[in-house]
Image: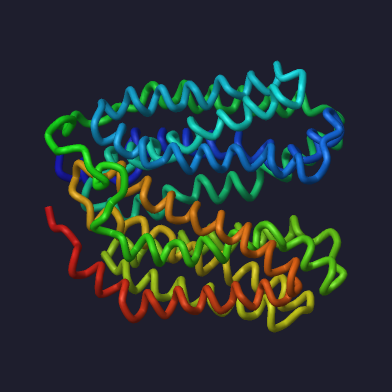
């Protein structure tokens, strides 16, 4: 009986992994082609496209603190299912949006269930994991996101080139998300004591204040990725004349993420969270520095692999650290806190990166990124890891 309890790949964990893959696959199927869809179908200009697509990110960010509170305060299975159902049904909204205004409303509102679902799903994954395998399980859990991010855009582009139809992509996202929803319904989540009304409503119920320095550190790393993901294509074209390498870059980055999660799971299993994170932030720092210091194809593509390897070590270690400084009834809040910190960093990176690039140039913007990443690494090595050890909760 004890061995069964300690089994990592139990039925519930496998199901939530597949459901998480379906969630991100459906999401990334549309992401790379929505700008083209808005341009071709609604003749939207570049600035309008930016505004339309940014609404999704904003509502996703705003929903996460509240979703953390909900999954901690109400039956987790019900919250999870409602979030997944709303995430699924909004894909039908894209099919019915016949004007730019309707599409904007649907896209913006879709961010709410997406942001909430990512928090609920990761919290459910923790619930179905045996406590002795939790660190390792969280590391593997992120593989579903990484694999979906690696293959979904390529699948979408292949289908669009073959059919020249956005409608097929919307239908496919709808079907894939329904599969995830149906599978989620069969997941058995252990019963737990509800904490609703047991604590006074405060900031702690929406943000894990015990992990504030971890969040500050995560903002640094999110900032760097925000600039990279937004301005990579333009920088590559202007600085090195690379016009078709963006897809290859993100494929290599995804490979790095997948490899490092697999390789780093031994350390997570042994509880070496700060060691994994330290290795990750150092390798990522080398990657970001190489990206801007060596503006040639070798430096360009090698940086993708290094940043992927580094972030693949760093992120699951940080997620485990957030959970380790939270009480058992604050897991949803812990998950929402790391996602909010990352999103804030990405958002600031997109805005500030654009301002610096406009005023000084893209090289200067990426030098700023390299400095920010190194500052984040120094902060972790000199302060955050000790902060974690002091605040870690043993339950």
In the rendered image, residue 210, in percent from the top left (x then y), is placed at: 23, 58
**Residue at (58% x, 23% y) in the render:** 90
Q: Is residue 214 left or right of residue 92?
A: left
Above or below, 14 against 293 in this view is above
Q: Position of residue 277 (x, y in %)?
A: 39, 69
Q: In the rendered image, which quarter is residue 33 located in?
A: top right
Closer to the camera, 114 or 56?
A: 56
Quarter of the image that includes the N terminus: top left
Q: Say which of 196 and 245 sits in front.
A: 196
> In terms of depth relative to the viewer, which is nearer, 50 or 119?
50
Visible residue check, residue 4: no
Left or right of 176 on screen, residue 264: left
Q: Quadrant of residue 307?
A: bottom right
* Residue at x 46% of width, y 50% of height: 142
Residue 303: which quarter of the image? bottom right
Q: Residue at x 77, y 45 (%)?
A: 47
Up-down: is 363 above or below 268?
A: below
The percent position of residue 248, horizontal first and vertical second, equals 74, 59
**Which residue appears at 84% of the width and 28% of the height?**
41
Q: Nearer the viewer, residue 65 or 30?
A: 65
Give the percent coordinates (x, y) of residue 346.
Answer: 55, 56
């Amino acid at each position: 009986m004890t061995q069964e309890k300690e089994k990592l790949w139990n039925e519930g964990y496998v199901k939530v992994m597949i459901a998480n893959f379906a969630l991100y696959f459906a999401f990334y199927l549309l992401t790379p082609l929505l700008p083209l869809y808005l341009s071709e179908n609604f003749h939207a200009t570049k600035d309008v496209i930016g505004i339309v697509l940014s609404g999704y990110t904003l509502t996703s960010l705003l929903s996460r603190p509240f979703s953390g509170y909900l999954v901690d305060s109400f039956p987790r299975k019900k919250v999870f299912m409602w979030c997944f159902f709303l995430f699924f049904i909004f894909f039908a909204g894209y099919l019915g949006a016949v004007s730019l205004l309707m599409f904007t409303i649907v896209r913006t509102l879709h961010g709410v269930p997406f942001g909430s679902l990512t928090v609920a799903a990761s919290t459910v994954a923790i619930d179905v994991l045996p406590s002795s395998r939790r660190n390792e399980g969280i590391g593997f859990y992120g593989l579903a996101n990484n694999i979906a991010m690696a293959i979904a855009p390529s699948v979408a582009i292949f289908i669009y080139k073959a059919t020249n139809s956005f409608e097929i992509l919307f239908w496919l996202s709808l079907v894939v998300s329904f599969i995830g929803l149906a599978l989620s319904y069969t997941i058995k989540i252990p019963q737990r004591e509800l904490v609703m009304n047991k604590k006074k409503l405060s900031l702690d119920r929406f943000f894990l204040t015990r992990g504030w320095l971890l969040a500050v550190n995560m903002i640094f790393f999110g900032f760097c990725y925000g600039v990279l993901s937004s301005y990579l294509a333009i920088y590559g074209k202007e600085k090195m004349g690379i016009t078709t390498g963006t897809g290859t870059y993100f494929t290599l980055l995804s490979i790095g993420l997948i490899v490092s999660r697999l390789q780093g799971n031994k350390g997570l299993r042994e509880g070496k969270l700060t060691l994994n994170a330290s290795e990750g932030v150092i390798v990522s720092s080398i990657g970001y520095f190489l990206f801007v210091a060596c503006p040639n194809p070798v430096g360009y593509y090698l940086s993708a692999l290094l940043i992927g390897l580094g972030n693949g070590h760093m992120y699951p270690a940080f997620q485990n650290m957030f959970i380790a400084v939270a009480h058992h009834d604050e897991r949803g809040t812990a998950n929402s806190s790391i996602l909010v910190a990352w999103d804030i960093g990405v958002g600031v990176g997109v805005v500030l990166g654009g301002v610096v690039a406009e005023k000084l140039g893209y090289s200067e913007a990426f030098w700023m990124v390299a400095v920010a990443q190194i500052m984040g690494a120094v902060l972790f090595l000199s302060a955050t890891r000790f902060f974690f050890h002091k605040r870690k909760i043993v339950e």
